[in-house]
Image (spheres, grey):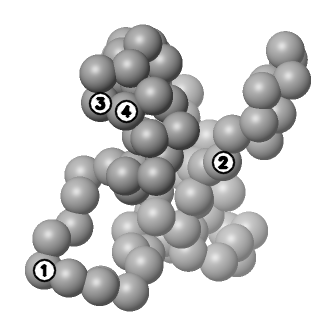
Amino acid sequence: MVTKDGCVFHIDFGFIFGKSPPKKSYFEPAIRLNKPMIEVMGGKDGENYKHFKIMAAKAFLHMRKNKNVILNTVMMMTDALIPNLPS
């Protein structure tokens, strides 16, 4: 996906709808963000990582506020036979 200002981002719809990747250990994080991703943002103390955490929280709160629109959109797609989409 690409934002209006040209930033590229990825949405793992399979993961969102409950299809987890194969388990590599007993620990399954709440968000799929690995150490190299954090390092690219300047590490845990880096300004970019701090900004990422703020923006992730804002995105979550925005989606939560608009949950009815999101859920209604997903419900309309249930008959479309989209892989990983619950029916």
Q: Sequence-wise, which precedes: disc 3 or disc 1?
A: 1
What is the C-alpha distance between the residues marked 3 and 2?
21 Å
For badge 4, the amino acid type reads Gly
Question: Based on the displayed image, in which of its 4 quarters is residue 6 positioned?
Answer: top right
What's the mark number on residue 43?
4
Q: Residue at x 48, y 46 (%)?
A: 37
**Pick the front one: 16 or 7:** 7
What is the C-alpha distance between the residues marked 2 and 4?
21 Å
Residue contact between numbered discs 3 and 4, judged by CB atoms under 8 Å: yes
Q: Sequence-wise, which precedes: disc 1 or disc 2?
A: 2
Q: Sequence-wise, which precedes: disc 3 or disc 2?
A: 2
Residue contact between numbered discs 3 and 2, judged by CB atoms under 8 Å: no
Tell me where residue 12 appears, x and y as whole percent.
Answer: 57, 58
For badge 2, the amino acid type reads His
Element type at mark 1: loop
The answer to whether 31 is drawn above or below residue 40 in the figure is below
Find disc 2 in the rendering and name its residue. 10
**Pick the front one: 52 or 47:** 47
For badge 3, the amino acid type reads Lys
For badge 1, the amino acid type reads Tyr
Find disc 3 in the rendering and name its residue. 44
Find disc 1 in the rendering and name its residue. 26
